[in-house]
Structures are given as C-alpha cells and as structure tokens.
Amino acid sequence: MMASKKAPHATLALPTGETIPRLGLGTWRMGEDRRRREAEVAALRLGLDLGLGLIDTAEMYGSGGAEAVVAEAIAGRRDEVFLVSKVLPDNASRQGTIAACERSLARLGTDRLDCYLLHWRGRHPLEDTIAAFEKLVGDGKILSWGVSNFDADDLDEAYTVAASFGETITCDQVLYHLKERAIEHAVMPWCEKHKVAIVAYSPLGHGTFPGPRSAGGRVLKEIAELHHATPRQVALQFLVHRPGLFAIPKASTPEHATENAGAGDFQLSDVDVERIDKAFPRSSHYRGLPVL
Ligand SMILES: NC(=O)c1ccc[n+]([C@@H]2O[C@H](COP(=O)([O-])OP(=O)(O)OC[C@H]3O[C@@H](n4cnc5c(N)ncnc54)[C@H](OP(=O)(O)O)[C@@H]3O)[C@@H](O)[C@H]2O)c1
C-alpha cells in the first residue's frame, strides 16, 4: 500500500501576500436555532484548532444569526482566522454596502474582515459596490474584497471596474463539488488567467454526497483506503488540488469538523485524480454558472 504524504499545498498565498489554509469552515444554516448554537460554536472552534482557519459567513445566513455564532467562536482568537462575510445584493449600493459591513462587524465582534464579498450580482451597479469596497479598504474595515456567483462575463466587468481603482478581485466564491463541475468550463480558466482565487462552496454537495454504493462512491472509497482516508476527505482533496482553489465545507459536529480537517493530511496521486475525473465527469456543454 502506498504511503500517504502530507499535502504540500495545504495553504495558499494570496495576492496580498498572506498565507491562508485552503480548507475552511462554512456557516450557512448556522445561527438559525438557539438549541444548536453551542454545538455550532464548538464545531467552529474545533475546526480552528485543527487548522481550518478560514471562516465563511454572510449577513444573509440566519439573518445575521450565523455571524453571531462566528463571533462567539472567534472570541479571543480573531488573529487566527481569515474571516470572510458577504453583503446581500439588495444592500450593495455605495452607502448600503458600507452600512451592511458595519452591521456585520458589530455582529462579528471585530473591527475588520479579511475579505468581503458581494453575495451575488443584483440591481446595484458594480461601480457603486466596488467603490464602497475600496472605501472600506481605505478605512481598514476590510483587508480585501471579492465576489460570489460571478460567471466569466461578470468577472470581466468587475475586473475592469477594479482596475479603474488600481485594484483586483481577490476571489470568486462559486458552487463546486464532484457532481457539479461547471466552473471548469469558463470560471476556472478565467480565474487562473487573472490570478483570482476560487472558493468552492458546497464542496460536499450540500447534502448530496455520493453514496457508497454508487459507481462514483465506490471509486472514492477505493482511493480513500489507499490513503487511510475517507471518501469525503478524498473529494475535498480533489477540489483543492488545483492551484488557487479553496473549499469551505460546513460542519456542525466535532466528528464532521475533524474529518474535514483531515482532508489536508495527504496528497492524491495523478492516477487518483484521473480516476476521480472519470468517475465524476464534468458536463459536456456549458449552460451557465449554476448557483444554490
Ligand atoms: N456564496 C454562496 O452563494 C454560497 C452558497 C452556498 C454555500 N456557501 C458557503 O459554503 C459553505 C459550504 O456549503 P454548504 O453548507 O452548502 O454545503 P457542504 O459544505 O457541501 O455540505 C454541508 C453538509 O454536509 C454535512 N457534512 C459536513 N461534513 C461532513 C462529514 N465529514 N461527514 C458527513 N457529513 C458532513 C453537513 O452536516 P452537519 O452540518 O451536520 O455537520 C451539512 O449537512 C456554506 O456553509 C456557506 O458558508 C456559499
């Protein structure tokens, strides 16, 4: 049996020069039920202990409830976390973006976000949202900004607006998992060309992970056994094996956080990658960027 190696690319350097972990922690559906709060905080704190040092949240999640959960999880350890939140498109006017960011900072109990994203494109001109992002950077309230659910043509536009400020987009956060590889058609080549990071959301399929009896599930299990790993760890490692890619699985139990953190502990071989590629082929035609 082949010995597993520690992945050399468990972290990635951003254009800002900062090095951050490629595997982080999602928070969608957190902060919705007080009875689950303690477990959610504990799962996030354990995830941080285990090196999942990027937390992704949004003003939308639990109508601010997820940010309140994150605040509790990062209390006393803000410097260990690369913290990302998102503005809702309806709030993304020039003044609205700044006000939304200030509300998020207050809920999160911090004075800065490491990255602030436009959650998806809405009615407000990109020029206004990006002008607000730049103001927030100037004021030290955010250290960088990016977008989410942007297809290649939207990215082109945002990139041009960013360039007019002498800036660039840090990342595009998009749907990407083994059964949904549409970003490989247009978004991924665009991001690789322009050196914009990709953050894979719903990397475990948002509850649709391939079962052990499916053809693809059997391939994952065989590869997992080679690396003393689990099928989910193999799937996560497959997503982040490309340059410039991050993934933010959401885990609300200690077991799930521990398993997901272990996805950074080994490296897939070229043969493994080829087998996964064949077992979960991307669609042959591009029908636009899928979103959740
Ligand atoms: N920008 C956007 O528009 C957008 C859209 C969707 C998601 N996101 C972000 O991406 C994050 C991740 O996506 P997601 O939450 O949609 O889905 P996901 O991470 O693909 O899947 C989460 C589901 O998988 C379960 N799970 C996690 N680890 C597991 C493990 N090791 N074994 C078994 N089950 C496991 C979770 O259960 P438990 O909760 O019980 O642990 C949860 O039900 C979100 O939380 C959010 O931060 C962004």
Image: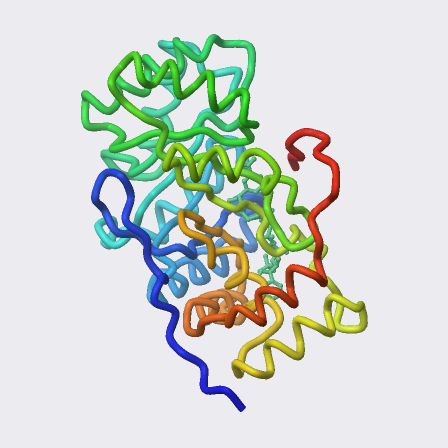
For the C terminus, the quadrant is top right
Expressed as whole percent of the image width and height from the top left, the position of residue 206 reads 65, 50
Image-based side of 174 in relation to 284, left or right: left
Colour scheme shown: rainbow
Q: Residue 117's quadrant in the figure?
A: top left
Look at the picture and state if 200 lies above or below 185.
below
Look at the picture and state if 287 lies above or below 206.
above
Q: Residue 142's quadrant in the figure?
A: top left
Image-based side of 273 in relation to 216, left or right: left
Expressed as whole percent of the image width and height from the top left, the position of residue 185 reads 61, 38
Depth check: give the residue in front, 124 or 229. 229
Look at the picture and state if 140 lies above or below 237.
above
* Residue occupying image coordinates x 69% and y 48%: 282
Expressed as whole percent of the image width and height from the top left, the position of residue 236 reads 53, 61
Depth check: give the residue in front, 139 or 6. 6
* Residue occupying image coordinates x 40% and y 47%: 244
The outermost residue toward the bottom is 1
For the N terminus, the quadrant is bottom right
Expressed as whole percent of the image width and height from the top left, the position of residue 88 reads 50, 23
* Residue occupying image coordinates x 50% and y 65%: 260
- Count of numbered badges drawn on the protein: 0
* Residue occupying image coordinates x 36% and y 61%: 9
Look at the picture and state if 33 lies above or below 191.
below
Depth check: give the residue in front, 156 or 36. 156
Depth check: give the residue in front, 220 or 56. 220
